[in-house]
Structure formats: C-alpha cells, structure tokens
Image (cartoon, grey):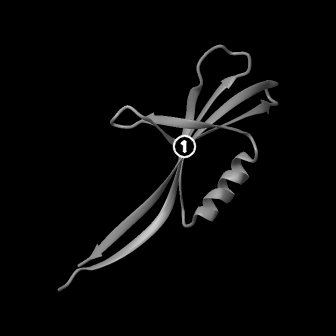
Amino acid sequence: MIPRKTMKTYYKIIIDYTQKPAGSNGRYAITGDEVLDLKTIGEVEKELENRFGNCKKVWIYRDDKDGNAQKVGRIYCHKEREYHGSKTIYWQDWVEIKEVKEETILI
C-alpha cells in the first residue's frame, strides 16, 4: 500500500492576556491565554479588528540564535473601566500569529 498525503494550511493566533490597575507601579499580571485556529489570513485580520479595533500596537521582539532581534508579534494596548469597583484596568494583550502547514499521512 502506498501512503497518501494530504496538506492543510491554517493560521494559529496565540494570545496572552495581561493587565494591571491604572496608577499601579507594579508589573502586568498574566490573566489568561487563548489559542484560535483560523482558515485564512482574512479571518485572522477580521478577528484582530473585532477584538482590538484601532488600539495602540507595539512590536514583540525575540532574539534569534545569533542574538539578533526578530519581530514575532504585537502587543495590543488598551484600557477598560470596571464599573463594579469603578477602576480603570490597563491591558496588554500579547499576540503571535503562526502559519501552520500540517501534513497528514494516510496508510
């Protein structure tokens, strides 16, 4: 029997949610994470637009094996007012997008 291969390409959005109260000098605390798998880059763009709109964005850098900084994602910065405690929360959501090429081998 000759193995048959099928190739599937999709996009993975990896989000790490961080927050801190306004006026705090402390560090941002990680409050959760989420992973989304989407079929097209258009779906990725629409998802990011729906979640973050036109909030401030800054690059995420990671050093490669030679010590050179490489852009690997974005931090989406926004604030939200909590009405229960009447306080403002600053959010920094760290977002990376990966193109995944998955090969299935059928025997």
Residue 41's spot in the image, x, y percent?
58, 62
The front one of 74 and 94 is 74
Taking the view exactly as shown, the residue that stands out farthest to the left is 1
Quadrant where the image shows the C terminus:
bottom left
The residue under the point 77% across, 26% down is 88
Q: Tag count in the figure? A: 1
In the rendered structure, the answer to whether residue 106 lies left or right of residue 55 reads left
The residue under the point 57% across, 26% down is 29
Quadrant where the image shows the N terminus:
bottom left
In the rendered structure, the answer to whether residue 83 lies left or right of residue 51 reads right
Question: From the viewer's perspective, is residue 37 above or below residue 65?
Answer: below
Residue 64's spot in the image, x, y percent?
38, 37
In the rendered structure, the answer to whether residue 64 lies left or right of residue 55 reads left
Residue 95: which quarter of the image? top right
In the rendered structure, the answer to whether residue 72 lies left or right of residue 25 reads left
Q: Which residue is mark 1?
A: 73
Taking the view exactly as shown, the residue that stands out farthest to the top is 25
Amino acid at dot 1? Gly
| Label 1 crowd (10 A; few <14 / some 14-19 / many >=20) | many
